Amino acid sequence: MSATAEHDKSSTGAPQPGANLLAMMGRIPLAGFVSVVTGLLLWEVLSRFVVANPLFLAAPSQIFTAIVSLSESGQLGHHIAVSGLEFLLGYVIASFIGIGLGLAMASSQTAKQVCQPWISGLYATPTIALAPLFILWFGIGTWSKVLVVILLVLFPVTINTEAGLRTTSVRLIEMLRSFGATPRQIFLKVSLPSATPFILAGLKLGIGRGLIAVVVAELFGSRAGLGRLISQSADAFNMPELFAGVVVLAAAGIAMTAGFGWLERKLVPWTKD
Amino acid sequence: MPVKLAISGLGKRFDALEALRGIDLAVERGEFISVVGPSGCGKTTFLRIVAGLEAATAGQVLIDGKPVTKPGGDRGFVFQSDNLLPWRTVFDNAMIGPEVAGRAGAVEKQRTLDLLKLVGLGGFERYHPRQLSGGMRQRVNLARALAIDPDILLMDEPFSALDAQTREIMQTELLRIWEQGRKTVLFVTHQIDEAVFLSDRVLVFARRPGRLQETVNVTLPRPRALPVKRTPEFVRYVDHIWRLIEDDVRASVIEEHA
């Protein structure tokens, strides 16, 4: 009898994942959709009739046309490929190093003492300002950009990995210890899974920082890439193409962050209620 | 009846604080023993030493004649908070013990499934902890400890976070499950009526330092059902134990508010 009572409680109390998603889809998009469309319309009107000078502001329709013509000529694809490669290389390398460093710092007090001052110092520094230096050292090709991306992505990943492992619930560790678990088993069965949401959050933070790194590094000196497209267009007062570059970057950022949201729901659903 | 658990001269010191002093106890196989006392009497420390989660600073704990130095598969610990892994299903949570011991074979899986049924969670194997009520989570906590088929079950105030009605239900459920396996149980609680209802013997602890003040033999017939709590004998036991610890409880309450 008691089990039935508790069952009822849980089936009404626990949120149904499917129903929740539907409710969200039904609610947010209407207001969100109206907000975006109104914003775009205001922008269009403002740039065509108020500013009315294509040297200062491009209208959404002009940006759209620029994107289409840049894609047709193959230029946009080339810029995206160059920036995409720089971002991907830097991001993947930084993720591996960052998670590794975080693991080392969480498991060894010495490693933490050695790394902590550098990581705290460099995380707080606007390291993006070092981009010209990297270009001076490593040339205007891909690798100087990759290094800037690494420098910006590395720290949030490291800090979050370390924090996630360090904040593992002592009660969960003790539970495992009561079954005679080895340190290795405790790490694999408790610490690592409970740090996963933190690590994912660090990687998510890294997306925005990595995109900034690519663009800014390219602004300082490059042959191709979205940052290059933006600086070229700015020099030529070609606002539609400048905004085309920005829109593509924004879309990439939104798409990757949304992808991460999906990944989080798959990998760490217990943090989502 | 053979002695399962023998404790002699057990003491524990945390720097200046003496948490436990001179505990002697012999527990027979299949006995249900409760430990009650005011907060700060060291009852949880006592249980943790028997579990091997903490080391004693004096005396020793023997299980079947062998000294306890660390946690082992002969003891199952039921925690005050359920300590379920949120990313695991009910079944996978209950299987953690056999898994850690490297014995997660078909036999253990079947036993765990049977245990989940026994604790009233049949059909909930694939649920996650966040989908369960507090009472159900404590049932998983219990099944998890039983899944390693321990000789001794150590329970640290397992029902204290539950509401009063759920707690009463869980007490009867625990007795029902215990009647089937007759494990040796050490049950720590601050609820006197819970201790009397469940136990063959109630150990009454005093504080500063934590020590065994009196052992109360409960001779109420088994199996016991909830109505026994309203009988005069039952009330006499509760009243007697309350008198033993009343002054200590008052002192600890005043200290907590100071």
Image (cartoon, rainbow, N blue to C red):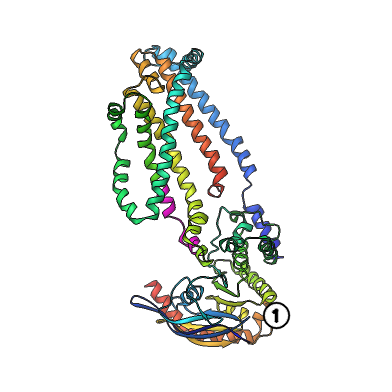
Magenta span main SS: helix
Q: Residue at x 55, y 31 (%)?
A: A31
- Percent coordinates x, y for residue B216 in the rendering: 56, 87
Where A34 sits versus A177, above or below? above
Tell me the subunit letter for badge 1. B
Name the kind of residue labelled 1 in the image: Pro
Q: Which residue is mark 1?
A: B223
Q: Which of the 4 image quarters holds residue A229?
A: top left
Residue B26, picture quadrant: bottom right
Q: Residue at x 38, y 28 (%)?
A: A214
Front-most of residues A98 and B187: A98
Q: Is residue B46 left or right of residue B99?
A: left
Pick the quarter of the image with the N terminus of chain A.
bottom right
> Residues in magenta?
A161-174
On whether residue A170 falls in the magenta region, the answer is yes
Give how far across and how far down residue A4 sits, in percent.
Answer: 71, 61
